[in-house]
Amino acid sequence: MSEIGKTYRGEDGGRGAGAGTGEERTDVHALDGVDLVIRRGEYVAITGPSGSGKSTLMNLLGCLDVADTGTYRLAGTDVAGLTDDALAHIRNRFVGFIFQQWNLLARTSALGNVMLPLAYRGDPDRPARARAALQSVGLGNRMGHRPNQLSGGEQQRVAIARALVTEPALLLADEPTGNLDSTTGADILSLFDRLHEAGRTIVVVTHDASVAAHAGRRVRLRDGRIEHDDAWTLAGRAAGASPVANPPGGIDADR
């Protein structure tokens, strides 16, 4: 990502303060000049207070939304100007999503839920690939169970397997332990650690310092800008210079 900006425009009229009064609503600058490079195999935590731009950055990283200004390359692909269909293809091909809400189909087995992203591709090997993904997260004996037959931690593991099954360039997790008790949350974070050790590229968006502590690099947002990036400190130490103020941006899945 380079010089990324995202503004949500205020509108006159409608609902809320100033509705129908002719008063001009204030634009919200969710992101302002964000530069971010994430290398293949990195484990990065995006942190910051409420309203800092974390959710907007997550949506842009996952191609759920597009920036107003700047450039973003995901696995070598410039996503600016792509159609909605092209963005959907990029998401299915390159991004595995893990949300706080597991978003599992209630009447579908764990195996069926994990096969779903492959069904969109028409992948003929989806049963075998889904079984392998479930086995990789320790659910080899729970494949036929529906979500209501699984614990919260098991449901999150199904969601992680669903994210892994497409072999994405980027695993993007939004508060992945937010709905779990501390013990189950620790188990999920241990799984993330193992995925990172296996070479996965992981970005976790969180306000929880204990979750962020598992990442090898922390990026802190405030008021739509990067306030701190561990990479700046590391770069400064390596070069014997001050932290870089405006490093070039992107997500590199090829090196």
Image (cartoon, grey):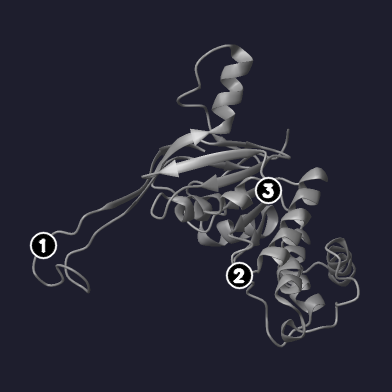
Between tags 2 and 3, which lies in front? 2
Q: Which residue is label 2 attached to? A: 179
In terms of image quadrants, where is residue 191?
Answer: bottom right
* Residue 189 in sight: yes
Residues at marks 2 and 1 touching, judged by CB atoms closer than 8 Å: no
Q: Nearer the viewer, residue 152 or 14?
A: 152
* Dot 1 amino acid type: Glu
Q: Give the distance between the C-alpha atoms of the residues marked 1 and 3, in whole angstroms.
A: 43 Å
Q: Please provide percent x and percent y for residue 17.
A: 18, 68
Q: Give the distance between the C-alpha atoms of the residues marked 2 and 3, in whole angstroms.
A: 19 Å
Q: Which residue is label 1 attached to? A: 23
Q: Secondary structure at mark 3?
A: strand
Q: Which residue is label 3 attached to? A: 202
Q: Please provide percent x and percent y for residue 189.
A: 72, 55
Q: Secondary structure at mark 1?
A: loop
Residue 69 located left or right of residue 108: left
Whether 172 is drawn above or below 217: the answer is: below
Q: Give the distance between the C-alpha atoms of the residues marked 2 and 1, in whole angstroms.
A: 40 Å
In terms of image quadrants, where is residue 122?
Answer: bottom right
Between tags 2 and 1, which lies in front? 2
* Residue 167 in sight: no
Q: Secondary structure at mark 2?
A: loop
Between tags 1 and 3, which lies in front? 3
Residue occupying the point 25% across, 53% down: 27
* Dot 3 amino acid type: Ile
Circle 3 Cα neighbour tier, 10 Å, few/some/many (<14 / 14–19 / ≥20): many
* Dot 2 amino acid type: Asn
Whether 138 is drawn above or below 55: the answer is: below
Circle 1 Cα neighbour tier, 10 Å, few/some/many (<14 / 14–19 / ≥20): few
Q: Please provide percent x and percent y for residue 163.
A: 72, 61
Residue occupying the point 71% across, 38% down: 40
